[in-house]
Each structure stands twice: as C-alpha cells, then as structure tokens.
Image: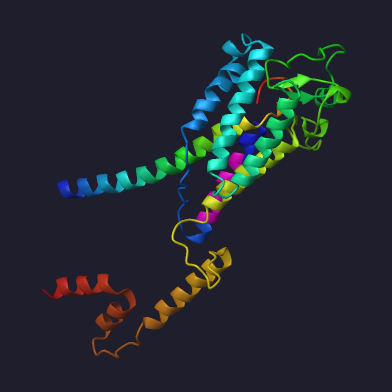
Amino acid sequence: MILLLAIAAGLLAGLARAWHGGCRLASPSLHLVWLVPVAFVPQWLAFYLPATRRLASDDLAAAILVSSQAFLLVFAWFNRHESGFWALGLGLALNLLVIALNGGLMPISPETLSRLVPDAPPGAWQIGRRLGGGKDVILPIAATRLWWLGDRFLPPRWFPYRVAFSLGDAFIAGGAFWFLWMLGKGHGKRQNKQGRSDYAYGVFARCRERFAKWQRVEPLGKRGGGKSGVLRSAVGRSSDSAENRLQR
Amino acid sequence: MKRYIRDLGLMLARLDRRHVRVGMAVLTLVLFVLGAGAPQDGSAGGG
C-alpha cells in the first residue's frame, strides 16, 4: 500500500506538471512489458490472493519470490533508459540481494515487529516462519545476512499508516515517483543550446512565443481595413478564412 | 452529420490510443512496484 501511495503521488505530481506546462502526459516506450505480468501473477497467487496465499508453503513462496524478482530485474535493465528506472532497478536489486541471502524471503526482526505492532501479545510470532502469508520472514538481527537491507525502517509516528520497509523499498518508491513526474514533462519540448529540454527553458520559450505573437498584431487602420485588418493580423489564418466566407 | 460523427470518432480514437498507452505504462509500473517491493504492514499481510 505504501508503494501505491508513491505511485498516486507521482501521478498527481506528473499531471500537475503537465497541466502547468501546457502539455499532455508523455507516453513512455517501455520494452518487454509482457515480462511484468508474467512475473507478477505467481506473486499475486502466493502473496496477495487470500484464497491461495495460505496454500503456498514457505519454500514455494520463496522460490516464487526470487524467480519473479529476477524477471522484474531483467525488465528494469531493458528499460534503464527511462527516467526513474535506475532507482527502480537499484531498489529491486537491493531487495533481491537480501531476500536471496536469507532463504528467499525478506527478513524482518522481532524488534522491528514489536515497534510495528506494539500491542501484539508475546510469542505472537515464531522465529524463522513466514509472516502472515506475506513476503517477510521473522529472523533475529544476529542471524540475518545484510540485516540493514531488510525491512527495518518505520515511518514517523504522525504518519497514519504503519508499515516496515527496506532501503530497496525506499528506492522503488522514489523511482516510481520520479518516473511519473518525468511523464509530466510532456511531448515536443524545445531543446536549449546544450541539447537539454529544461523545464525553465520551456517556460521561457512559451513566454517568448506569446510575446512574438503579440508583436505580430498590427496597429488599428494600418492596412486600411480597420476591424478586418486587426482581425487578420491578430488571429491569423482562421480569421482570414472566416472573413473570405463573409465576403463570398 | 455523418462527417461530424466520423470526426468525433477519429478524435476519440486518437485520445483513446494516447490514454491507453499512458494507462498501460502506469499499470505496468503498479505491477512492477508490487512485485519488486516487500514492505510489511501492520496487518502482517503481503505487499
């Protein structure tokens, strides 16, 4: 859920950016898109669908998680040219590394769990067991390889949603936000002299264009046509055709 | 009338193609993020 919040925030920010810049959301050209649903469906069955996730044994769940994330890493590699995918790929690689080194599931310590659910009764969790049909396995810090890459961070107390997340999750959330934010840059941006499409340069170019259009408006009566002359020069071709139709 | 309907259809088709492409990219990102991330919420469930 916390990662979906990052996507929602990124989408809103990207739409706001596109609206402010007067353009539409860019449509990215992602490669090997089919890999993502193929990799996700087994995870959906093993971790998300309540009817099936209890049926998957810990070993099967671990095998599904590692192989699925390996497929997703391939997808991230082939799309590394897209904005934000370096962070998405790095976050996934960190998660996959710590998961693979700890038996195929994301380690979470009993200390983090007691901070996450402070009113849980003692002995509510068993060390070494998968946690509630999810992706986490309860492991003490001393028995965890690369424990600092596991689910050990909690949001501040004022945050309404309680969740434990890893460093990789933070990179993934940041990458998703950045990807959607960059979609708001839109299509057809002019390039500056350095060959970059800066947001500030886009605003400057639009102002210059409007000023040039304003300059093209000729003074009243210069073409002898009075109202029609102003109309022709101010509005351009469309008003010309309208005027011609009127004359005809 | 027919021409207007045809033009409207073409415009909607163009809009749809663009929106579908953006929508597919967002959906792909959602699935990727759900598959790549492993946060643990307080309910001890998945994702």
Percent position of residue A14, x then y = 55, 50
Q: Tell me what residue is drawn at x 66 percent, y 19 percent.
A: A62
Percent position of residue A124, x then y = 82, 12
Q: Is residue A106 above or below residue A13?
A: above
Q: Give the magenta range.
A: A7-18
Q: Tell me what residue is drawn at x 46 percent, y 32 percent.
A: A34
Q: Quadrant of the N terminus of chain A?
A: top right
Q: Is residue A212 above or below residue A57?
A: below
Horizontal relation, residue A32 to residue A240: left or right: right
Question: Which secondary structure is most common in the magenta stretch?
Answer: helix
State the colouring used for the structure image. Answer: rainbow
Magenta span contains residue A17: yes
Percent position of residue A61, x then y = 64, 16
How many labels sit on residues? 0
Residue nearest the observer in this picture, A39 or A78: A78
Percent position of residue A181, x then y = 57, 50
Q: Residue furthest top?
A: A55
Magenta span contains residue A167: no
